[in-house]
Amino acid sequence: MSAPRRAAVFGALGRMGERVRAALEDEPALALGAALEAPSHPDLGVEVAPGVRLGDDVGSALEACDVAIAFASPAATLELLRRAADARVPCVVGTTGFAPAEREEIEVLAKRLPILVAANFSVAVNVLFHLARRAAELLGPAYDAEIVELHHAAKRDAPSGTALRLGAAVAEGRRQRLEDHAVLTREGETGARPEGAIGIQTLRGGDNPGEHTLLFLGGGERLELAHRSGTRDHFARGAVRAALWLLDREPGLYDMEQVLGLRD
């Protein structure tokens, strides 16, 4: 049996970073090669796995590893991707909350190395994206689409990346652009619902890892598609699966649905 490939985890002591490190322990083909946090982190130098100490040196981590997995801030993730492009190290990105200009930079960097960006690494959630796209296509414009998402009180971005990706799947099924039809807030005298609107409503509280419900509302009936998370472990397992899939791929921008064979 060949030696396992090595993965660098950025945001290694965050909520998702901890679960990714645990998932790596259960994957014989991939091992933790480096664990990184911000330069100001109080636990720098602590051993987080046999022979692996928490560090902040991105260059050294990339030199030691075959693939990187990032759940960090947008700014830190972009800096990683810039360095990874020079080092030719594939990157799996679970960071959310990128601004439009930052997403454009990721697309440019993907011309130099394989980058897989996913709002959610759950296998079931990515099946939900697939179903949402198909349902929107089959139901057509007669059914209004609304998305409700709930996350823990500490989540910084809203709506969630998963909710936005779910809205994009609905728009794709309708052959639209989410940017042209998303309704993220409602307050005061809003008037009638705009034709083709895709509503996304945000709830925050407690320690919920994530819930997403998509409603297609028609005359006298509605269809609901929902996913509810009890832990973060399935997200982490999906990220590790994505990292294995991304190894040795050609440069390009990939997503989790491609990993699962749900689309080309």
Image (tube, grey):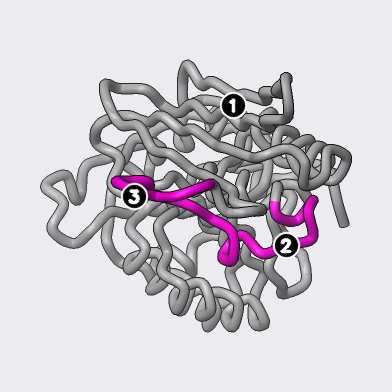
Look at 18% across and 62% down and name the residue there. 39
Placement of 247 over or under 242, stated as above or below: below
* Residue type, label 2: Gln
Relative to residue 179, is residue 189 drawn left or right?
left
For mark 3, does the 10 Å Cα neighbourhood hold few (<14), some (14 to 19), or many (20 or more) residues?
Answer: few
Placement of 128 over or under 243, stated as above or below: above
Quarter-wise, where is residue 61 in the image?
A: bottom left
Which one is earlier in the sequence, the residue at label 2 or at label 1? 1
Residue 156, image x and y in percent?
Answer: 28, 47
Quick check: can you spot residue 27?
A: no
Number of the front mark, 1 or 3: 3
* Residue type, label 1: Asp
For mark 2, does the 10 Å Cα neighbourhood hold few (<14), some (14 to 19), or many (20 or more) residues?
Answer: some
Q: Which residue is mark 3?
A: 157
Residue 26: assigned label: 1
Q: Which residues are magenta?
A: 171-192
Residue 82, image x and y in percent?
Answer: 46, 79
Quarter-wise, where is residue 143 in the image?
A: top right
Q: Which residue is mark 2?
A: 176
Which one is earlier in the sequence, the residue at label 1 or at label 3? 1
